[in-house]
Image (spheres, rainbow, N blue to C red):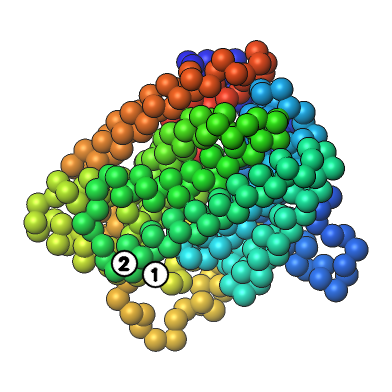
């Protein structure tokens, strides 16, 4: 579907409306009458209330409605998926030592790692409640199928994350595009695309065979989305992207572009790249965070200097990546055409998603919900954040 103004307007409006509905549902779920744990429950709303796309709940609701289901049937599962998503983000930010999330400091930088882990755990626990509450709406059988789907989602996501962490820990570079796609399917596709679509279909009363056809559309869409996300991490604009640019290089993540560069680099370039990528990222790189706070007027320049002095390490740090080394890696990626290669592979996966959508299209009711699903085909590849 062309990226027309009407498509963009539809997409933005639909995502915003679904996000507002789901945030309200999450507010209802988070206890407000537990004064002894008020700090916990207030922080559970920290990430959900930050500006975000709300893609997962929109996928769930749009699929359900396009197949003839009701908003009531999809809303609680959509809220559960959004809770899972934000819990995963909290834990992922800790594992990656990320500084920013949705344009603001990560939760563990604001409140410490122990508090952030506990908040993420609590969100995962709370996410079961809306699935149980939905039994009265769609019945026990479909609710159990949704619970089974969500259970598999959690396992697939954890396995995908473990696979990526193992590659980094072991310094593994003998990887092909197929290895990357397998990791992405587990880590990203299951919880961001496959599960929202399958859950929406189950909530609409669809049989298992039908949901599997829809899952293939979601899988291809998710792989396209993740490749584009990795491209943006290396080429996006700081204000538009909303995350730490170049973070994948600081963390040594095996993205499609980095693997392509390593395959095409000279032996000397590859050896130097491997040496740099094995180094840890700086453990106290607060400069981007401090500069962002000053730019938004949330921190004075004198306050920035006080924080710099207070955060100064007591002894020389261990050998860590430097900005110059990360720039060297980025130059290699550009030199060997790896960004364009990533864009090309993303376009190929988008074509697969379009073919899978065409197979599903006959089962969708003509509606804004069907139009939303089609508009996502353009969005995942042409988005800027």
Place of residue 150 in the rendered image (x, y in percent of width and height, measured from the top left): 62, 50
In this rendering, the answer to whether 366 lies above or below 259 is above
Residue 22: image location, x then y, percent: 74, 41
Q: Which residue is mark 2?
A: 321
Left or right for 235, reference 45: left
Q: How many numbered tags mark residues here?
A: 2
Q: Is residue 117 above or below residue 86?
A: below
Question: For mark 1, does the 10 Å Cα neighbourhood hold few (<14), some (14 to 19), or many (20 or more) residues?
Answer: some
For the point 39% across and 51% down, which residue is it? 183
Q: Mark 2 or 1 closer to N-term?
A: 1
Residue 123 falls in which quadrant of the image? bottom right
Where residue 195 is drawn, which disc sits there? none
* Mark 2 and mark 1: Cα distance apart in space: 6 Å
Residue 371 to residue 327: above or below:
above
Q: Residues within 10 Å of mark 2 (few under 14, many from 20)?
A: some
> Of 346 and 149, which appears nearest the observer?
149
SS label for mark 2: loop
x and y percentages locating residue 247 in the rendered image? 41, 55
Report the front residue among 213 and 42.
213
The residue shown at (85%, 74%) is: 36
Q: Residue at x 31, y 50 (%)?
A: 179
**Mark 2–mark 1 contact, CB under 8 Å?**
yes
- Residue beneath the point at 21% across and 47% down: 261
Which label belongs to residue 282? 1
Q: Position of residue 7 (x, y in %)?
A: 57, 18
């Amino acid at each position: 579907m062309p990226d027309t103004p009407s498509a963009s307007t539809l997409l933005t409006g639909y995502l915003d409306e679904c996000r507002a509905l789901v945030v309200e549902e999450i507010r209802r779920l988070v206890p407000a009458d537990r004064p002894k744990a008020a700090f916990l429950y207030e922080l559970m709303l920290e990430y959900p209330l930050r500006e975000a796309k709300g893609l997962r709940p929109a996928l769930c609701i749009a699929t359900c409605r396009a197949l003839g289901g009701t908003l009531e049937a999809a809303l609680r599962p959509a809220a559960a998926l959004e809770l899972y998503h934000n819990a995963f983000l909290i834990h992922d930010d800790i594992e990656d030592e990320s500084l920013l999330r949705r344009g603001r400091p990560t939760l563990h930088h604001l409140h410490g790692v122990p508090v952030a882990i506990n908040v993420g755990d609590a969100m995962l626990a709370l996410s079961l409640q809306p699935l149980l509450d939905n039994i009265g709406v769609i019945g026990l059988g479909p609710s159990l199928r949704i619970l089974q789907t969500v259970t598999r989602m959690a396992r697939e996501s954890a396995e995908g994350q473990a696979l990526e962490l193992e590659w980094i820990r072991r310094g593994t570079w003998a990887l092909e595009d197929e290895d990357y796609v397998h990791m992405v399917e587990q880590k990203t596709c299951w919880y961001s695309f496959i599960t929202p679509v399958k859950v929406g279909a189950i909530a609409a009363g669809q049989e298992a065979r039908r949901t599997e056809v829809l899952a293939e559309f979601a899988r291809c869409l998710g792989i396209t989305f993740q490749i584009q996300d990795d491209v943006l991490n290396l080429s996006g604009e700081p204000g538009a992207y909303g995350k730490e640019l170049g973070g994948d290089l600081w963390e040594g993540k095996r993205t499609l572009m980095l693997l392509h560069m390593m395959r095409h680099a000279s032996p000397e370039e590859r050896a130097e790249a491997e040496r740099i990528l094995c180094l840890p990222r700086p453990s106290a790189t607060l400069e981007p965070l401090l500069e962002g706070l000053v730019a938004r007027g949330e921190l004075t320049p004198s306050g920035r200097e006080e924080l710099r002095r207070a955060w100064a390490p007591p002894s020389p740090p261990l050998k860590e990546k430097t900005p110059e080394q990360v720039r060297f890696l980025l130059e290699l990626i550009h030199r060997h055409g790896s960004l364009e290669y990533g864009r090309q592979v993303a376009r190929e996966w988008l074509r697969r998603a379009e073919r899978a959508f065409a197979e599903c299209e006959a089962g969708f009711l003509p509606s804004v919900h069907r139009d939303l699903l089609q508009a996502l085909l353009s969005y995942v590849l042409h988005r800027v954040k």
